[in-house]
Amino acid sequence: MCLFWFRRDLRLHDNAGLYHALKSGQKVLPFFVFDTDILNKLEDRSDARVTFIHNAISNLHGELQKLGSTLLVKYGKPSEVIKELLQGYEVKGIYLNHDYEPYARRRDAEIQQLMWDSGLTFNSFKDQVIFEKDEIMTKSGTPYKVYTPYKNAWLKAFEPEMAQPFSVEDESSRFHPHEKTQVIKLEEMCFKPSAIKVPDPNLANDTLKRYKDTRNLPALDATSKISPHLRFGTLSVRQAVKLALKHNDTWLQELIWREFFMQLLYHFPASAEESFAPKFRHINWRNNEEEFLRWCEGKTGFPLVDAGMRELNTTGFMHNRVRMVVASFLVKDLLIDWRWGEAYFAQKLLDYEMASNVGNWQWAAGTGADAQPYFRVFNPDSQVKKFDKEYAYIKRWVPEYGTSSYPTPMVDHGMARDRAISTYKLSIAQT
Ligand code: FAD
């Protein structure tokens, strides 16, 4: 018998590691661990992502029971849980999918050692991307640091079979037979259900066809909302890429941005903690805590920034265009360290993913591998004129906009822009 460990791939269909486990000819016992090393770091005891995972796990448990099998759901430290499973069952090996975040890589290396020390197999597979870590490299064998050549190489290397699903339907009798198990309750882990729901993916033909023209308009529901589903694996990347190939190149390019940032974080894990470009490691951030709080609460007096922050605080989602605007405002207009913004997004975003979050924050801050130039500072008012000229998005999230109870702008944008540019120049001079 072998174990299959669900992590950020919470589905039975088109799951590479699960497919290989079932094809191995052994009975497969699937399990999931609510990892205390991760859960204990969450500040919000009704974190919407925990509720979402809990629902996804309960669904998987139900699906597996229908197949006459089960899902073991554990709560603890993964290495301890796995040691316990090795004692309780006659296991020959473990199957799982690669996870590229720094914490996951350390954790998986420990499990690999544990398995090998016990004379058992450790079988890990690529599942969450089409191309991983070192599959798309420059001619000189180094990782790409610039998106466009990466994208071109990605498209050149891509073959349609790579988006074919891993189908397991006729293998279902290979699951370990049913055991009486229950999914641990949220309350037993000291969590409460969240009122925030993860939206279903919007993969309607019309949405994807119109994407290129409407994706920058936050008032419309014109993007796919698949990001949390890709994050937790309730949707497979192959399914998304197949749809993109059918409908829209622009949308495919967004999926390639995701893989671009994943390979960057894999090769440069330190970029999660420091500016990628050494010349921007000496920025004299102002880091004013009161101003940071006004940004977090959506009370800056800049309506598009405030609308975005309130959307985030209320729903766990923020439109991509608005994410760029709020990030630029925090980093450039307020001169607050991008890591503060990154950490706030990490707490709030349903789709939080370290690679995309760090990559995009560093893009907006101008400190990243392939970032916008440091002297380009978004003007939050012109962004309204371009992308929300009817004020429909703003009015939705900032109903008091235009009345006397709405705050005046907390900073003069022209002054702040000049201040940011000269502060960045000083960092370059000190390098
Ligand atoms: P769509 O527009 O429908 O795009 C489809 C998919 O393509 C997305 O789900 C996502 O997987 C990928 N994608 C799209 N844009 C980007 C991008 N710029 N970078 C990487 N992948 C992209 N995305 C996350 O998934 N997690 C994050 O933590 C995250 N943090 C961000 C922080 C900032 C400051 C910014 C500017 C962007 C961030 N993004 C993040 C990228 C982007 O905003 C979201 O992926 C997108 O808004 C999700 O909505 P959607 O699924 O409707 O996207």
Image: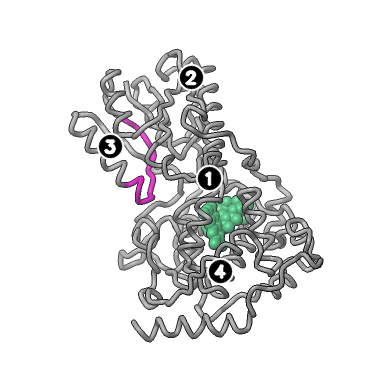
| Front in this rendered view, residue 257 or 406 | 406
Q: Nearer the viewer, mark 4 or mark 1?
A: 4
Q: Earlier in the sequence, mark 3 or mark 2?
A: 3
Residues in magenta? 94-105
Q: Which mark is residue 111?
A: 3
Whether ligand 1 has any atom under 8 Å from the Cβ at mark 2 is answered as no
Q: CA gap, disc 4 to disc 2? A: 45 Å
Callout 1 environment at 10 Å: few (<14), some (14 to 19), or many (20+)?
Answer: many
Q: Which amino acid does label 4 sit on?
A: Leu
On-image quarter of the C terminus: bottom left
- Residue 386 among magenta residues: no
**Residue tagged 1:** 230
Q: Earlier in the sequence, mark 4 or mark 2?
A: 2
Q: What residue type is labelled 2?
A: Gln
**Residue tagged 4:** 330
Q: Which amino acid does label 1 sit on?
A: Leu
Q: CA gap, disc 1 to disc 3? A: 24 Å
The location of residue 236, given as percent across then percent down, is: 52, 41
Q: CA gap, disc 3 to disc 2? A: 25 Å
**Residue tagged 2:** 182
| Front in this rendered view, residue 86 or 160 | 86
Tag 3's secondary structure?
Answer: helix
Q: Which of marks 3 and 4 is in front?
A: 4
Name the residue: 34% across, 34% down: 78
Give the colour scheme shown: one colour
